[in-house]
Amino acid sequence: MTSIIKTAKVGTNADLFPDILHMYVPEGSRILDMTYGKGVFWKKVDTGKYHLDTNDISEDRGDSHYDFRQIPAADASYDAVILDPPYIYHSGAVHKEGGMHTDYRNDERAVAGVYGVPAVDAMFQDGMIEAYRLLRPLGILLVKCMDQIVGSKQVWQHITLIGMAEKLGYTVEDLFVLVRNGALIMRWGHQVHARKNHSYFLVFRRPK
């Protein structure tokens, strides 16, 4: 009996990502991971079953090193695109948490001035516009994101991105929840809201 793929999974990106590919990206698809980073999504995927191009602006990560908002590839080149930009709203130069900040190199991003809700949302939008250009009709865009607390206020990043995708012309196909398995890091001693221990993979489709 084939195991049932569920909406939520406890574990890591590498644990959940193969389920999403299984449901939405057939073997043999040409895929662009436009924000490859350390390649954590792919650790449990047989990449030989796909035609995978990896891009990251850092020269020590990925096969190409372009700004993901401007990929030099022809229109309608890919069956699927992966977008996982530095989505933490606050500055890593101010809030040292290691782990996620190290992986996303938030210190470098802070120096470049790309932090705060408007700047990060604009970065997502530019990436989604570029992905739309690169996707073939009915192609899939997978977006990683996380709701956050900013200035003691809830910021629902996944809701923002779903609305953004619909305005850009995407069809919203699915939503997967990754529940973190491990200790949470608290920046402040006083807690105002429930601490976020989950993130999302959003599945969008480019229409015909």
Image (cartoon, grey):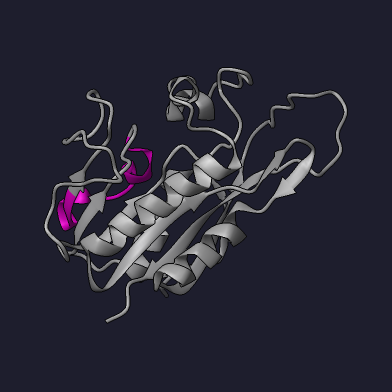
Is residue 48 highlighted in magenta? yes
Q: Is residue 69 left or right of residue 116?
A: left
Taking the view exactly as shown, the residue that stands out farthest to the left is 74
Which span is picked out in magenta?
Answer: 39-52
Q: Is residue 201 left or right of residue 183?
A: left
Q: Position of residue 122 (x, y in %)?
A: 47, 47
User: Does 104 appear above or below 17?
Assistant: above
Number of marks in the rendered image: 0
Asked which quadrant contains residue 19, the reply is bottom left
Q: Is residue 18 visible?
A: no
Residue at figure coordinates x 28%, y 26% from the top left: 58
Residue at figure coordinates x 47%, y 50% from the top left: 144
205 or 74, nearer to the observer: 74
Q: Position of residue 138 (x, y in %)?
A: 28, 76
Asked which quadrant contains residue 78, the reply is bottom left
Residue at figure coordinates x 40%, y 62% from the top left: 20
Q: Is residue 137 visible?
A: yes
Q: Position of residue 99 (x, y in %)?
A: 53, 25
User: Does 84 appear above or below 50?
Assistant: above
User: Does 67 appear above or below 171?
Assistant: above
Residue at figure coordinates x 21%, y 49% from the top left: 47
188 or 90, nearer to the observer: 90
Quadrant containing the C terminus in the rendered view: bottom left
187 or 131, nearer to the observer: 131
Is residue 197 highlighted in magenta? no
Taking the view exactly as shown, the residue that stands out farthest to the bottom is 208
Q: Position of residue 18 (x, y in %)?
A: 37, 56
Quadrant containing the N terminus in the rendered view: bottom left
User: Does 2 appear above or below 182?
Assistant: below
